[in-house]
Amino acid sequence: MATKTKAGPTKYEISINGKVATVVEDTYLLKAVMDAGFNVPTLCNHKDLTPEGTCRLCLCEVEINGKKKLVTACNYPVRGEIKVNTNTEKIKKHRKNLAEMYLGRWPNVEAIQNIAKLCGATDKEKYKSDITDENPKACILCGHCIRACSSFVLQNILGFAGRGITRHLTMPFGETDPHCIECTSCGYVCPTGAIQVTDDMNNPADPELIRRHGMKINAMMATLDDVQNRMRQVGTANLVEVMDSYDLLPVHNYRFGRHKDTHKIDSKVMKSRYFTQGAADGCWEGCSMACAKAVDGFELKTGPYKGQKVVVDGPEYETAAGGSNMGGFDLDFIVEYNFYCDTYGVDTISFATTMAFVMECFEAGIITEEQTGGKKLNFGAMEDALECLHEMARGEGFGVDVGQGIRRLKEKWADELGADPGFLNDIGMEVKGLEFSEYVTKESPAQQAGYALAIKGPQHDEALLIFFDAINNQIPTYEDKAEALYYFPLFRTWFGLLGLCKLIWNDVVPPDNSKYPPNEATKIPERVEDFQKFYEGMLGEPLDEKKMLRQSERVFNLQRLISYYLGYGTRADDMPPLRAIGPATEEEYISREERYDKQMKEEIGIDPEGKSTGEKLAITREFRYKRYNELIDAVYKKRGWDNNGVPTVDHLKELGINIPEVLSLLDKP
Amino acid sequence: MITINNKEKLEWHEGMTVQDLVDRMGYVVSIITVSVNGQLVQKEDYATSEIPDNAEVNVFHLAHGG
């Protein structure tokens, strides 16, 4: 009987050898059979590879409406109520015959001998012939290597050539393909040892260790990415719709967290109408995640290359969300500003966040068409925003001002136009002179600190805690948040020390990750161990969490020291603007009035009843800055910094940073 | 009443399933793991797994940056 609910997958009750089993629609029959406790011999099946039905050993009899047929169980999707028999006399005879044929061709290959035993085949002579291969490591044409090269690392270098008895494994034109990056995926899946891995590289201490953990990740990437983050399909763009769902997508200079037009710029549209290729993005060819995407043949509508068709590298999430931040819910706009930022050498995040600030100032009347050179820079003014970018590149017009960034624009407009510096500081999303990247942090104190404490300014490379904090509530206390703000910046920047991409760390999460308690699960312990093994396999030195963090902590503190010396490394420099930690305008407060009023009552202990929006804004502001300061008190302490956010001499010496010239950076006047 | 992630409270109703909760809260299924009173619920069982009254539900999202 099929059970179908209005949401959720269809399930079927099927019978396997007389035993009833409930199976989700489209599950391959082989899995259903094995889950029900029955064994079926297989040769070309591999747990990490899509099935191909090549060896024909897994044939089972399937009966539908009284009609019987034989199917290869490995790639037969269950789509109805079927009666299955895995071991009829006909099937047994067929399997034995097949196994005898395999045995005749490759009598000494262990995998073949095992199959023969399972199928009751013992006669090596029956099918012996001129093409019998006595090699115990012969290639048995199972095709695992071809499928691994394709699905693990997306390289399609291996293939079969020839038909019938001449069929053999090869690379294009029978030559060693220069695109082969020697990832050893083929060796990993080869059941006979026909593919030998000879290590000829830069002398890692234990290549087998690296391979073991690396292959496990490659296999997980091939089997799980499609149902988790879909990085292979759409890169980081899948975050657009995710962030919008959780009210975290920056809209109109971070005033709001979602918008009715987000569906026009989400990953579904990008995939169906824009992305044409995956493209290695200055990262390793043959990466099993291969998340970088590109758009081919995009016709530009503005600027010096107007009318030309170009390849655009992206857009990634940040660039797309920069679009929503500017009110530009149009992928043609987003792809175009992506292209020109790349071409001009301008960061898309800095451009988008600065433009969003400019637009809010324009709508608030702080700047007018007099300053903008006639441009009406309301939110969503995409053409005029692009013109600002072109002017910036040409070094003329209002675009030059935009190119100064938010910090300098705040000073300029307060000075020259008499703008209220308090308001500009509240809505200007920058810390340490760097513009915020594209997450709405109002409800996540941990992310506010993750951004504002970052050494170079509010970039999310150091700590992306917004989900752990605001949505999952996995770090509820100050201590939890302070621990996360100690651990994650150090852990995440560890990848930078080694020149490794950190996205592999949390793209595919092992299925049993939830067995760990919540604040451990956020670290994805199995994957951390994988990277520790890579290190050990490379350098011959075991690594644990303490050592890993210590490596990072030395560099992190040195950077903070330099930052301090340059005038960016104290508490005053770690302060976020009001817009990052709460509502900055009455419009924002009213847009989420129920939430803020509830918080006022429950967290602040003040009854919002009878108070004006202005009064409530002021109360919320005071509370949130107080809360933020209390949090960074705890973080500074955990990091071994003084209450002004400066590393103490004792802590630096404890880290082994005790060169007098370096310590003297603390003595700046 | 059920509690989500030790924080949010939600009205319970007879026959409430995990799928009902997901639909109501707008969770993105591909990035969540759900456990009800400490028991992990597989995605294919969301539509048929009932949440008892006073349950503690954990909905953990794992999302990277980009």
Image: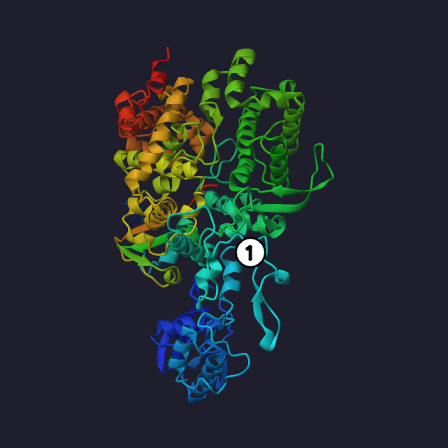
Q: Nearer the viewer, residue A421 or A436?
A: A436
- On the image, the x and y values in percent for residue B10 come to 32, 48
Tell me the crowding category of disc 1: few under 14, some 14 to 19, or many 20 or more residues within 10 angstroms, Cα based.
Answer: some
**Image side of residue A233 versus residue A462, left or right:** right
Hey, what amino acid is under mark 1?
Answer: Gln
Q: Is residue B19 visible?
A: yes
Instruction: Out of A487 and A303, give the one closest to the viewer.
Output: A487
Q: Residue furthest top?
A: A669
Seen from this angle, which residue lies furthest right? A307
Q: Which x, y percent locates residue A449? A: 37, 30
Residue B44, position as x, y percentages in the image: 40, 62
Between A288 and A295, the one nearer to me in the picture: A288
From the top left corner, tell me how far across and down residue A627 is, in percent: 31, 28
In terms of depth relative to the viewer, which is nearer, A341 or A290?
A: A290
Location of residue B58 with respect to B43 vertically, above or below: above
Where residue A91 sits, quadrant-wise, is bottom left
Residue A227 shown left or right of residue A550 in the figure: right
Q: Which residue is drawn at the image coordinates 55% and 51% (left, top)? A: A268
| Quadrant housing the N terminus of chain A | bottom left
Q: Is residue A598 above or below residue A646?
A: below
Residue at (63, 34) in percent of width and height:
A343
State the colouring used for the structure image: rainbow
- Look at mark 1 in the image and give the residue it sits on: A155
**In the shown orientation, is residue A251 left or right of residue B26?**
right
Image quarter of residue A582: top left
